[in-house]
Structures are given as C-alpha cells and as structure tokens.
Image (cartoon, helix red, strand yellow):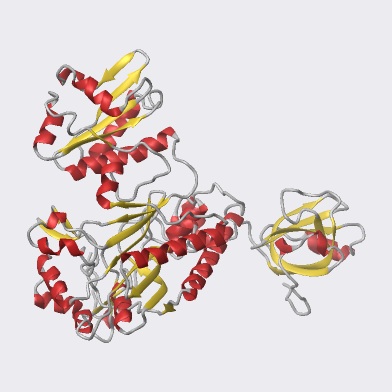
Amino acid sequence: MDNLQGFSRTGYCGDLRESDAGKTVGVCGWVQRRRNLGSLLFIDLRDRTGIVQIACDDSTPRELFDKANSVRPEYCIAASGTVRERSSKNKDIPTGDIEIELKDIRILGKAETPPFEIVENCKTDETQRLKYRYLDLRRPDLQRNILMRDKISHITRNYFHENGFVEIETPILMRSTPEGARDFLVPSRIHKGGFYALPQSPQLYKQLSMVAGFDRYIQLARCFRDEDSRADRQPEFTQIDMEMSFVEVEDVLKIGEGFISTVFKEALGVDIPLPLPRLTYADSMNRYGTDKPDTRYAMELIDFTDTVKGCGFSVFEDAVAAGGTVRGINAKDAVKTLSRKEIDKLTDMVKGSGAKGLAWIRMTPDGVACSFSKFLNEGALDAILEKAGAEEGDVILIVADKRASIALSCAGALRSTVASKLGIVGEGFNLLWITEFPFFDWDDENGQWVAMHHPFTAPMDECLPYLESDKGNVRAKCYDLVLNGIELASGSIRITDPELQSRIFTLLGLSDEEAQEKFGYLLNAFRFGPPPHGGMGLGLDRLVMQMLGADSLRDVIAFPKLKDATEAMTECPSPVDKEQLDILGISVTE
C-alpha cells in the first residue's frame, strides 16, 4: 500500500475545467470504474465534488500503466498529472471536456467488491444499504443531499447571527419533563435510581436564557423523542431552535419569514413571496380537514351539514342531530380513476381513521350512481349535487360523524389521498402559517382537557375571561409553519405571569406541589423579572427533505435509524454487559 509522502493534492476532481489545461494537478478519491482498451486505459476518479477522467496511453511508462490497470472499483487512490483536452468529450459531466494525463498514482486503500453498486438512485434494498451506510454515503445523490444540508445549516447560522441572535448550547442530559412524547432516559451511576432525560426540545432552557437576558437565542439543537418512526420522523433529529424577548406573535413570524425567504433564495435560488399566507386553525380544519394543509392543489372540503338536514339518510341526519358534521370533496374528472374498487379502498382508509363509512356519488356518462340514493327524500340528491358543483366525470365522496373532528380529519385524509391518485399535486413550495390553535384538547382516553401544545403557551388575551367556563373555545398565541402539507415549525408566545401560569396548571389538573416538582426551576426563575418572550422550533431535517424533494428523512441524515428505530450498521440498540447494569443499579426483566 502506498502513502502520500511527496504527493500534493491541489484540488477536487469535480472542479477541474478546460481553463486548467496544461496545469499539473493532484487529486484523490475513489475509483468509479476502470476501462482497459488495450493501448488506452481510463480511470474515472470520484470525490464529493464529482468525477474526472484519468488517462494512460502508449506514452505512459509500462510500470505506471500496469499499476493503474491493477485498480478496481472503490479503491482509494491519489493521482497526479497534466490536465489536457479530451479527444472524446463527455457532455454529461462538468469535467467532460478534459482529462488528466497520468504521471503518478498511489494506491492508498484496496477495496473488496462492494455489496451494491455505488451509483445514483441505487435500487438495492434500503436496509442493506443502511447496513453499509459509509458506502451508501459515497453515492453522488446522497452526498449532494448532505452537502445541501451543510449549506442550509451555514445559511441558518449566518441569518440569525446577522439578526442579533446568540448561539447558546443547552444540556443534552436534563430533567425529564412531560412534553407529549416519551423521553429517552439515561440512568445515573452516581445517583442510583435517578435518571436524566434526553431533550425532546430545549424548551425550558431557552426560556431560562430569556430570563438570563440573552434576548435572542438560536441553536441547531439535537432533540430526541421515543415515538414511532415514519417517513418524516426519526427518534433523533435536529431543530433550528429560536427564542426572542420583548416580542409578540407578529415579531416572531417576521423573523421566521425572513429566514425562510433567505434560505430558499441562497440555497436554491427560489424567491418566496412575503408575507406568507395565513389561516387560523379553525379555517384550516374547515377548508382542508387538517392543520397542515397542502395548498398546491384546490379541492377544498365541502360542508354538506345544512344541505342534508331532513334528507332522509339516517347516517347524515343522526350526525347533524348530534351536533356533528357532514363533509366531503368533489374529485373533478375522477370517475375513471376512482372506480368502485378504488372507492372500496378509500372506504377502508376512512374506517381506519375512525369514520363509520364512506358515501359516494359517481357522475358517469351513463348517469348518476349513488351509494345512498335509495334512502334519500325527493330532491335531496339534487341539492347535494348542486352544493358540490357536480358535473359529468366528477366523484363526490362524503363522510359524516357525530364528532366533527373525526369527519373533518377523515375528509382531509381523503382529500390528500385522492389528490395523489389523480396526480393533481402541483410543483413548487407552498408555505403558510396556521395560527390561533386551540389551547386545550380533549383527551378521550383520560376524560380530561390537556394542553394541545406545552403548558407554557400563552392563551390569547380575549380568551382569558372564559378559561374555566369554555375550555373548548380558548385559543392560544400559537403558530405552525406548513410547507407542502408538512409541519415545518411550531411555536408560541410563552406565559410569564406566575398567577396565569398557576391558573393554567390548575386547569390542566396539576396541583401546586406537582407543578413545583416538575417545573419548579422555571417557576422560580419567573419570580425574578421574566421578560415577555416567544419563539419556535423549525425541523432542519424536514426543511432539507422538502427543499430537495426527498422521499424520506433518511435521505438527508448521514446516519439515520430504520422504521423500527434500529441502526442496521452498528446494530443498536444492543444488550450491555451485566457488569455495566450492576454499576448503574439496574436489572433487565424479560
């Protein structure tokens, strides 16, 4: 094996151009492929910037030619030589006009045959690729993703620093606090029976930073949540975390919009029109059936509640009588795509989401086919079709439930699924703010009101008089940023009035003793002149995923976990020695 003594790396493979012709250069990287054409030998050398061709011919010393001929794919080599114009140019790569006439080659690391080909859009099973993630990360498409993530991180820090924010690191080992998801716990060796928690977010520490007088805080914070993984969720993730003092909602949204505009412009060259559109939570649910709507297509929900009163169909009438709602969508020109078989699949989907079933109307060329027409009074079907603006070729899908929240969420899921089936989801980046979230959320399982967000979120001022009397209508100074149907950021203005905070804890069923035990350090800090403050956390992984159009967070995280929260490469989580457990005073039960 060779070494680099006496070798000088002058630059990167992908940066060389025709203007470098005649220069002596040194490059390092991995062999993409080797082609021996008898008297000609070519090596495609790859590093993180791209590929350059290295050439040997009759003028190359035989020993050097043979050494170059011995390399195989994924060998790590260094090569030097003179840049020259290629006789046969390759317009598919930026370096396709030139090649390096080989003068020296060093074999720095030999490679076995890789378990999969190191190429873009590799079709090998993801689990296999994640087992050899260090090889998977050599693929140019993944490397571009990681490099874009680095660029976005750099833009982020620059933007916030230019706007007066101070980067402050908060603890990774912290006290366990209830924040909605399960904590990852870390046992203490010194304090047996005591546990640290990994932060779900730096929420309390960033609020304490405001009390400390750092009126603008920023951190690219590592966060951990012990919850089931999905395409846009990982057990560990990075959050662009910010907090500001002496602000109200408008101030925080302005900073957030400035960041979004800056990062899209500098990273992708995309102009994001400001100000961003806004919807209240109530409007978003009524129009789209979700608090994170994808607005790249229309097909808003239709409210049939008043239309179907007295229609004769008991499913609709019972839902309305119980104070529920009847909602649906008009899938335009969908009659060919949404066959009876496809509608059966949609019915199973809404049942899985809590609905009792799915009513449908298909406007076929042969006439109107309706799943519930035999139950309708005279004129009721015409009224429904008129409300829906139905035309030949359309399919009307309707859900009803005694609980409006179920009908709305099922109709929203229908909207999203049908849009994908019809291929009507547009291109581009549609961002909007969702504001005025409910402060309380009813927990069916426990039969009590809980905080929809964290308990330090401030209620809207006009809702203070009926905090106790009308919890369902209390709105919060809370906001989410949504990008193409994905929640990108969430934040709020915080409570800093100790009396109001105590009042909220009482309404959430926390006694003074429990509140002091769980949040005493924050409550004590609020005895010493806390400034009004608010902020938000924006998911860096989700932002990069959306900006690149990636299918999964695993495509933009260097070493991600699988869906079952394991890491195929290191095979963690894994058992530990009994000796380690004994030191911690822990025993594992089956």
Residue 322, position as x, y percentages in the image: 9, 38
* Quadrant (top left, top right, bottom left, bottom right) of the N terminus: bottom right
* Quarter-of-image position of residue 572: bottom left
Residue 252, position as x, y percentages in the image: 36, 67
Pick the residue in front: 325 or 497: 497
Pick the residue in front: 96 or 217: 217
Pick the residue in front: 301 or 348: 301
Q: Is residue 578 visible in the rendered structure shown here?
A: no
Q: Is residue 531 visible in the rendered structure shown here?
A: yes
Residue 485, position as x, y percentages in the image: 38, 49
* Quarter-of-image position of residue 519: bottom left
Pick the residue in front: 478 or 32: 478
Q: Total label count?
A: 0
Residue 402, position as x, y percentages in the image: 13, 39
Q: Is residue 464 depicted above or below 399 in this figure?
A: below
Q: Does residue 372 appear left or right of residue 258 in this picture?
A: left
Q: Residue furthest right?
A: 59
Instruction: Identify which residue is drawn at 10% across, 33% down.
Output: 318
Q: Is residue 326 depicted above or below 486 in this figure?
A: above
Q: Is residue 232 depicted above or below 518 in this figure?
A: above
Q: Does residue 330 appear left or right of residue 261 in this picture?
A: left
